[in-house]
Image (cartoon, helix red, strand yellow):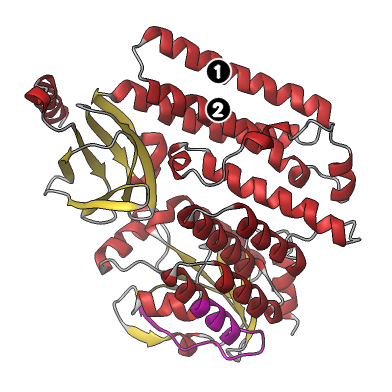
């Protein structure tokens, strides 16, 4: 297997050495995917799909991009997404395991060093984020000092890399921007992560120049999407701008992130500051679906939807969220649970309502969210022992073959009892409004919905189970 990769890299390097005497710029991208979720990889740039590339019988591919537009490209497999920086005459191979997607990703070939740097910084950023959450409990001055130190450490690593290897101006710009936007995001999340319930007080305690960098932020430059941390910054920035706006006309001391007023403020600010359709529509969709999936007051769904529909220009997004609101409305507490069709481990079909004879918690999983699959099943093992009065039904949402589903459960030594998969995944996911994947639905013994959107990892989940038992 390693020999195959070495041969491919040598061949691609030979191709790369031939500069085609002035012909169009190009780059090669190839790879091997272990434990694939599908038989193809989707290659995109700036949200435009370039091609859907099939995997061969060994789950490998090699693809040549002609007329290369240098920059960050996205390759996706299943629900997993990662980026790669491609410049003229790069010939990059990667190898990854879907069970550990980002951590297993390693690049080889011409152009690999800069991409291994970027992926390592991406993984380091995930570690730093956890540290920043703890630092948010410091006072603003101490917090600034600590995140400045993190930023300086990243800048030193970049300086060392640039001194060791010949880097392009494009790489330098992207790498430095990732550092800067990570730093900006740390500042934007400070009021939200700080433990104080009085967010107004937290905002008022910040130094006047705490957000001075905002004067240089560009909201409408679509090329900024090539910076890995830019999208995260925008989301955090608009959360924070809306918080400041909200407190101008609200007297609330305790902040509620599913407040209708706050979320309407957020959509209005996006609408006022962002004119680029791609950036604007993505933000509007993200904030609206986040509200809809967290909101427990269904009466507010229609209001937020109408605000979204008046601002977004994406027809597909409008259809998706309109349908989502309709599904959520059908899943109100007190409604009958839809009798969706399931298949059990013996490949026998049945309606879910025939399986419910006592209080039941229904949870979902996908091969594309492998960590959640394992963590949720382990959590349910604990809950079953504590609450034998309740049935726990697991449903796999994937549209893949029966054997893959069973093999995954067996490989992880999870019993097949109360394990099901959708007979019609797309239709069932729409009916049950399954987003996010952590959603759990609580049903009483009469198939009546008690809660259609809870989370088994929430602090009050066991209280909900006790309430279900005592109904």
Q: CA distance from mark 1 to mark 2?
A: 7 Å
Which residue is depicted at the point 74% across and 32% down? Answer: 135
Camera-side residue: 84 or 463?
84
Query: Which element carries disc 2, helix, strand or loop?
Result: helix
Figure quadrant of the C terminus: bottom right
The residue range painted magenta reads 322-343
Q: Quadrant of residue 295?
A: bottom right
Q: Position of residue 281 (x, y in %)?
A: 50, 60
Position of 391 relative to 93 (above/below): below
Identify the residue under disc 1. 155
Which residue is depicted at the point 67% across and 79% down? Answer: 298
Identify the residue under disc 2. 179
Q: Position of residue 346 (x, y in %)?
A: 30, 76
Camera-side residue: 118 or 439?
118
Mark earlier in primary sequence (1, 2): 1
Q: Is residue 336 magenta?
A: yes
Q: Position of residue 457 (x, y in %)?
A: 64, 58
Tell me if mark 1 has few (under 14), some (14-19) or many (20+) residues whose alpha carbon lies within 10 angstroms of its own: some
Figure quadrant of the N terminus: top left
């Amino acid at each position: 297997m390693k020999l195959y990769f070495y041969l491919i890299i040598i061949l691609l390097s030979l191709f790369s050495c031939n500069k085609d005497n002035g012909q169009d710029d190009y780059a090669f991208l190839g790879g091997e995917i272990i434990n694939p979720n599908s038989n193809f990889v989707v290659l995109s740039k700036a949200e435009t799909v370039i091609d859907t590339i099939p995997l061969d019988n060994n789950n490998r591919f090699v693809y040549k991009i002609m007329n290369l537009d240098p920059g960050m490209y996205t390759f996706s497999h299943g629900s997993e997404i990662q980026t790669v920086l491609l410049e003229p005459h790069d010939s990059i191979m990667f190898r990854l395991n879907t069970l550990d997607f980002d951590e297993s990703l390693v690049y080889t070939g011409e152009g690999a060093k800069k991409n291994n740097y970027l992926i390592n910084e991406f993984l380091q950023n995930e570690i730093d984020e956890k540290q920043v959450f703890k630092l948010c409990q410091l006072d603003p001055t101490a917090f600034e000092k600590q995140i400045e130190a993190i930023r300086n450490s990243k800048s030193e690593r970049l300086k060392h890399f640039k001194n060791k290897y010949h880097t392009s101006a494009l790489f330098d710009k992207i790498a430095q921007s990732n550092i800067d936007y990570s730093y900006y995001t740390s500042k934007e999340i400070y009021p939200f992560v700080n433990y104080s319930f009085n967010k107004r007080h937290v905002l008022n305690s910040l130094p006047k120049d705490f957000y001075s960098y905002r004067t240089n932020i560009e909201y409408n430059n679509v090329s900024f999407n090539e910076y890995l941390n830019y999208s995260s910054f925008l989301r955090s920035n608009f959360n924070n701008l809306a918080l400041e706006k909200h407190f101008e006309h609200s007297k609330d001391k305790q902040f509620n992130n599913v407040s209708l007023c706050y979320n309407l403020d957020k959509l209005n600010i996006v609408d006022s500051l962002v004119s680029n359709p791609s950036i604007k529509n993505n933000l509007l969709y993200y904030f609206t679906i986040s509200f809809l999936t967290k909101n427990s007051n269904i009466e507010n769904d229609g209001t937020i939807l109408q605000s979204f529909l008046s601002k977004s220009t994406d027809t597909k997004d409008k259809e998706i969220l309109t349908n989502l609101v309709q599904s959520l409305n059908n899943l109100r507490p007190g409604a009958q649970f839809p009798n969706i069709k399931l298949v059990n481990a013996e490949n026998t079909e049945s309606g879910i309502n025939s399986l419910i004879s006592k209080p039941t918690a229904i949870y979902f999983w996908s091969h594309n969210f492998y960590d959640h699959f394992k963590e949720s099943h382990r959590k349910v093992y604990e809950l079953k022992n504590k609450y034998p009065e309740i049935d726990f039904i697991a449903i796999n949402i994937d549209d893949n073959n029966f054997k893959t589903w069973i093999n995954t459960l067996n490989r992880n030594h999870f019993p097949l009892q109360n394990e099901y998969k959708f007979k019609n995944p797309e239709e069932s996911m729409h009916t049950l409004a399954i987003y996010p994947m952590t959603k759990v639905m609580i049903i009483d013994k009469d198939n009546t919905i008690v809660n259609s959107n809870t989370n088994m990892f929430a602090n009050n989940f066991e209280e909900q189970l006790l309430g279900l038992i005592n109904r």
